[in-house]
Each structure stands twice: as C-alpha cells, then as structure tokens.
Image (spheres, rainbow, N blue to C red):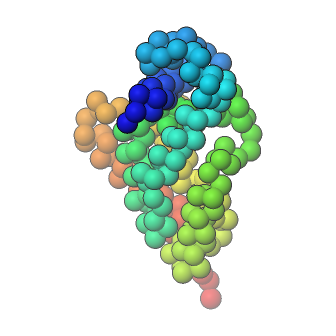
Amino acid sequence: MGDGQATRRRLLDAATAEFARYGIAGARVDRIAASAQANKAQIYAWFSSKDGLFDAVFVEHLSLIVGLVPLDATDLPGYAVRLYDAYLDRPEVVLLATWARLERVPTGDLLAVAADDVAVKLARIADAQQAGLIDPEPAPADVYSLVIALSMAWSPASVTVAASTDDDPAEHERRRTALAAAVRGAFAPRARAT
C-alpha cells in the first residue's frame, strides 16, 4: 500500500473510532487528523467535508457487514445469530448506524445506500416464502427488518443489555439460543386451515 493509500486508510480508521464514539456532530476533524497522523487538508481533499468523511466510513462499514454476514433465507435463525456475532466483533457498525439514524435519517430507509444488496436479500426471502420455508404473510421487507431488529437485542444500540466480548461465553450461547428460537418462532410457516 502506497503512502497516500496508507494515510487514507488511517484516516478512515480514525474517523470510524471518532464517529462511533461521538457521532457526526460531536466528532472533531482535528482529533481524526491527529489520531491518523495526517493533516486536515488531506481529509478535505479526499472527502470534501466531515459529512463526506462520515459517508465514506458509513458506506464502508455497511458493505463490510453485508459481506461478513450473507443472508441465507432458508436459515433465518442462523442469519440472526451470525449478525449477533458480527455486532460483537464489529460494534462500530451498529454505533455508526445508530448515529446515522439519530443525526441524518430520522425516518425512512437507513439502508438506501445499500439498496441493491437489500433487494437481493428481499428476493431471497420472497423465494423462501414461495417455497414454504418462511411464513408468507409478512412482506419480505418486514421479515428482513424484524430479523435485524431481533439480532440487535443485545447490540451496542440495545436499550436493555448491550453484550460485550468480555461477557461469559455461556451468556453468549444463551442469547444465541434465545435469538434463534425467537426468529424461528416468528417466521415459521403457519399451518393452514383446510
């Protein structure tokens, strides 16, 4: 990696930590530059503004989580558990999304920047519904949103208990089991009256 690319990487990493901790409004370009051992002019040259830098960080992390946790619509409980684990490994993904929701997109689709990836996932859910593997009643978009919401029950955005990698492994297993059972129960195909 060349010097310019290495500096850009350091800026993105420093910005990730800064935005995850302080949000968009609270983040300081001076702290990001100092942490990255770069200068503010480089931030503005590459990203135009603090908002542009946040956008770059957010899109990168959204892509990361999409790539790390592919959706298997035939195993929604497993998908939810893999998301739980991804949030443990990469809590900044949830924190960045939370700040984006609070400061940028208070209503509507937060994942609009990943619309193509989401469309593929929704098509997979619809296919699994057609195959009788998932309850056909809820819209695929609702299934997707609810599975994500359930997977975030112990995420850094939780309003009850936020999980940590320091938690007892037995706690993580208990949560994973409860999460899988909740998703399985919520979206299992219903027996139809004849």
Up the image or down, 29 lies above or below 142; here it is above
Quarter assignment of residue 162: top left
Q: In this view, does 83 lie to the left or right of 130?
A: left
Up the image or down, 165 lies above or below 109; here it is above
> Going 43% across and 15% down the picture, which residue do you hit?
37
Q: Residue 108: percent from the left, percent from the top? A: 74, 44
Q: Quadrant of the N terminus?
A: top left
Instruction: Work out whether residue 186 can be spotted.
Output: yes
Q: Quadrant of the C terminus?
A: bottom right
Residue extending farthest to the left is: 169
Q: Residue 103: percent from the left, percent from the top? A: 69, 27
Up the image or down, 98 lies above or below 172; here it is above
Query: Between 47 and 90, which is closer to the camera in this rendering?
Result: 47
Query: Between 194 and 179, which is closer to the camera in this rendering?
Result: 179
> Going 47% across and 12% down the picture, which residue do you hit?
34
Up the image or down, 136 lies above or below 172; here it is below
Query: Between 48 and 29, which is closer to the camera in this rendering?
Result: 48
Q: Is residue 141 left or right of residue 156?
A: right
